[in-house]
Image (cartoon, grey):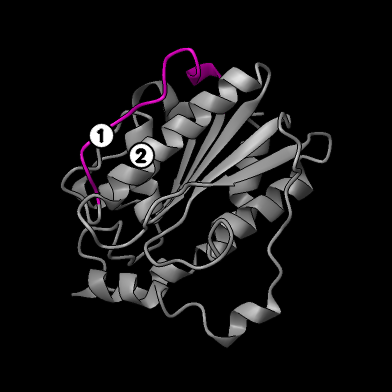
Amino acid sequence: MRIRLCLAALSLVGGAGIVTLSAPTASAAACADIDVVAARGTFEPGTLGLIVGDPVLSALQRKLTGKSLSSYAVNYPADLSLTSAAQGNADLVNHVKAQATACPNQRYILVGYSQGANVVDNSIGISSAGAVVGSPIVATLPAAVEPRVAAVLLFGNPIRALGKSVTGTYQSRTIDFCATGDPVCENGGDDVLAHLGYTTDATSAATFAAGKV
């Protein structure tokens, strides 16, 4: 029940407050130095995601002043349907593969919040099957692209509640935030509001990513 409350709360994050915020604008260059690929959380509003994606992009723009950045919002339902995360998984992989072909020198920062973290997990070969709003892996980034993924930034990652985390090839390039009491990523967590507070981690995530670029 607490987890469903968390996900339902994301649909209410919109409201009047959103109109006072301006989403960051990324470079429109087809071959920017770095493409920030963000998968939003369930029902999360915003361009890349009001709680995580947009603040992280803004923080990256401040940290990576010598680099050109583009951004991509993973195109998927981000709802409670059984195939939602799988659709995001396929879209993320297809996007990065296409970019990697078109832009041979481009690197990638992958960002995932809540269900979006499941999308990123699957895309780098860590199955989110069995997690809240998770799915089996339907596509993974090819080995040739792997060295070009500079950083993986995860927030409220549902696989954490299963005792899983990112291991293997991407482990050293991954930072995975789970707020104390967040029932989506902490088994037994009981603080619904903790799942909505990851905006405060945007600067830390961007600092981590900057150190990997």
Numbered label attached to residue 89: 2
Q: Residue at x 15, y 47 (%)?
A: 130
Q: What stretch is highlighted in magenta?
A: 134-149
**Are there few (<14), some (14-19), or many (20+) residues within 10 Å of tag 1?**
many
Residue holding disc 1: 137
Residue 79 location, quadrant: bottom left
Indicate the amino acid at tag 2: Asn
Q: Is mark 2 on a helix, strand or loop?
A: helix
Numbered label attached to residue 212: none
Residue 84 image point, x, y percent: 29, 52
Indicate the amino acid at tag 1: Ile
* Image quadrant occupied by the C terminus: top right
Please identify the dominant SS of the magenta region: loop
Q: Earlier in the sequence, mark 1 or mark 2?
A: 2
Q: Residue at x 74, y 42 (%)?
A: 28
**Are there few (<14), some (14-19), or many (20+) residues within 10 Å of tag 2?**
many
Q: Relative to 163, is 40 above or below?
A: below
Q: Residue most toward the right?
A: 66
For residue 191, say whether it is visible: no
- Contact check, label 1 and label 2, Cβ < 8 Å: yes
Q: Residue at x 79, y 34 (%)?
A: 67
Q: Residue at x 41, y 18 (%)?
A: 142
Residue 41 image point, x, y percent: 41, 59
